[in-house]
Image (tube, rainbow, N blue to C red):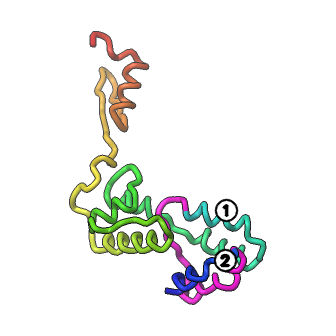
Amino acid sequence: EAFESILTKKDSLTIDKLFEEDGFWMLSFYKDKATFYCYGDCDVLFAQRTKLHASSFKAQCALDLIINNMIDYAPKTKEYFGISKNVGLIKVANYYDETLTQDHNALNDAKLLKFCMDKMAEGPCLDNPFPEYREQVIRIVGDKEVQTFSGIEEATAWMIAENHLDGA
């Protein structure tokens, strides 16, 4: 709610004003270590680039607090679903609720991420909702050794490079 009230006055805000005067509202939420969550590296990159344009020391400190305490939830999502590639936040959200949409604004993304985090906290994933994001493991057993590849493309490239396609 505090963030929403700040966004309503966005036309009159500068980077320094937002993070110096209004930015410290976030400190009221934390009694211990501040933690900020994102999905992917875009939020960290945005904060880092924004800091370059901040001239106020307080604004720079507020942005540093965010940058240094940002946790990317995408790797945790990969681990939770047992997949090897990042899956989009909206795909994860739609796994739980197909009616959800993504507007690609900070507030909507934060709500989607919170929704997904809460759902994932309910327990382990027992099915395989993203098979296309699982790593394929291919093993080729030769005379003396076993070669392991992450997909058919890698296995084919190895077979060509090593001339193992004789007689094919």
* Mark 2 → mark 1, Cα distance in angstroms: 14 Å
| Above or below for 122 versus 135 | below
Q: Residue at x 33, y 65 (%)?
A: 93
Secondary structure at numbered mark 1:
helix
Which labelled disc corresponds to residue 14? Answer: none
Q: Residue at x 36, y 66 (%)?
A: 101
Q: Which residues are magenta?
A: 15-42
Q: Quadrant of the C terminus?
A: top left
Q: Quadrant of residue 22?
A: bottom right
Crowding at mark 1 (Cα within 10 Å: few <14, some 14-19, many 20+): few
Which residue type carries mark 1? Arg
Q: Which residue is mark 2?
A: 62
Q: Position of residue 9 (x, y in %)?
A: 60, 82
Which labelled disc corresponds to residue 49? Answer: 1
Q: Is residue 125 magenta?
A: no
| Above or below for 74 versus 151 | below
Q: Quadrant of residue 142?
A: top left
Q: Position of residue 55 (x, y in %)?
A: 78, 72
| Above or below for 45 versus 12 | above
Q: Position of residue 159 (x, y in %)?
A: 37, 22
Tell which tag, 2 or 1, sits nearer the viewer.
1
